[in-house]
Image (spheres, grey):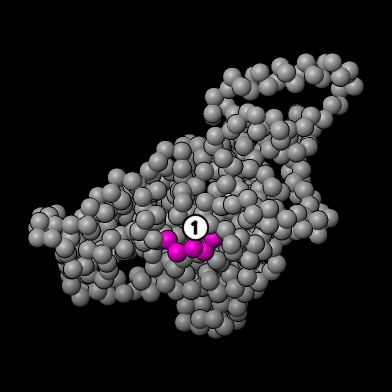
Amino acid sequence: FPVKEMRFRRHMEKLRNGQQRDLVLCKLERNRESLIVQTFKELNTQFGNQSRRIQPPITFNRVKVTFKDEPGEGSGVARSFYTSIAEALLASAKIPNLESVQVGTNHSKYVVPFSSILRSRSVSGSSRDQSTLQRRGSNSKILWRSARERKALNLDARPYTPPNSTDNATPESLNDHLSVHLQQIGERLYPKIHSINQTHAPKITGMLLEIPTPQLLSVISSDETLRQKVNEAIEIITFKQKSETSAQSSQPKKSPSVVVVDPVDDDNEPLFYSPGKRGFYTPRQGFASFERINAFRNIGRLIGLCLLQNELLPLFLQRHVLKYILGRKIKFHDLAFFDPALYESFRQIIQNAQTKEGEETINRMELCFVIDLMKEEGCGNRELIPRGRDVAVTSSNIFEYVRRYTEYRLIKSQEKALEALKDGVFDVLPDNSMINLTAEDLRLLLNGVGDINVSTLISYTTFNDESSEGPDKLLKFKKWFWSIVEKMNIMERQDL
């Protein structure tokens, strides 16, 4: 590791020296919610929504931080900031509303099809509905992806009538439910939507005119975002039409209803949770709203900045998270760091699988290719393979079951958050900067060592005397300082 560390530090120094600009975080507040919002907003302002595969990473010579009503902006203040933001991110309290931290309009990377948002409710429990519920998993929550999108695309919106309509009525009377400003926007919006989808252009235009005006203007200004919104609206309309047709054919006397499920909770659960060994965390992607995924990208940027600046970030991530950032393959043995008890249970089952007693044990467990998820992973259960509920786990396929189980628990259940973390790191660092590092190397570079030897710390420490006092007073201060450090416990030394 010392050789790898030296090479990595030298590479980071070269990147820093190649830049003249600094990242300045001004007048931050110590309050947890304000600190998170201010930090994320500044990072979004600096980095935007760039893709690391298109643009080069953005590096800085220094990171300068100042706190509100506190003097100083040196390296000590920056270290205090890294500690404070890490504690704020790892806290078990809910996160603040992050809509205000967004800048720019390119949200398409994290938007998902609206087919995953709609649920069809019918009076009778048809086999189609049952199979749909099985595919989604029981107890799963079908929610809007973000608070901004919850307000968007009303299925019952009145269609927009273009000015060149052949109807005898005037456009003003046909669109009298819209303000003059929205009618003017509709005149600009309708031709664009008509060029994408002629059949539903009036309906889609009416749906889009009901979303908040700032978001509507951003949709108009971006062809890619507009096309995405049109596709979402088409999926809503098509889903309703198919649901009505199916319900009418099965129960002609009763009318089905297609509803958008109201959100039960905002996507504001804590960003991390500790599934196994206490003190080590893994991302919690929640409902994967744009704001939440953007939060993980900003956390990745913080990781990248600390590595670039040769600073420590007390954000203790699980081993598989570090391997994902490095692009290493995540294997069954990584489950031991995630959930030691579960890993040991699987290990014993695999070890005994080829014996008669082991095969009988597997049969008695009545396992199938389904995984039950924790609350932090989305609740409910998911099939590990197509029609996995009908496939029993046996001694011949136990290896496949364990492999798929591990893959889902460690990767798929939180994949969007993991990918955002990785993207954030490489918004700051070049793609090849950590190619020779292992997960253990990255942990040491990012978190340092847990056990702090005071003698070693003394040999590394220098004092900059800015008090203009005599050498005797400085010597007295040093003795006083180190006597206190020696009395600290491990956690207090780490905080120091």
Residue under the point 79% across and 29% down? 463
Judge from the rendering whether residue 152 lies leftward or rightward of residue 236; answer left or right: right
Q: Which residue is mark 1?
A: 323
Residue neighbourhood size for the residue with mark 1, other residues' Cα within 10 Å, grouped as few (<14), some (14–19), many (≥20): some
The reply to whether residue 203 is in sight is no
The reply to whether residue 111 is in sight is yes
Residue under the point 73% across and 18% down? 479
Judge from the rendering whether residue 153 lies leftward or rightward of residue 178; answer left or right: left
Q: Quarter of the image holding residue 10? A: bottom right
Give the x, y percent position of residue 392: 16, 65
Is residue 321 in the magenta section?
Answer: no
Question: Image height check: is 90 above or below 342?
Answer: above
Give the x, y percent position of residue 336: 36, 50
Q: Amino acid at mark 1?
A: Lys
Judge from the rendering whether residue 117 lies leftward or rightward of residue 14; answer left or right: left
Q: Quarter of the image holding residue 211? A: bottom right
> Which stretch appears magenta?
325-330
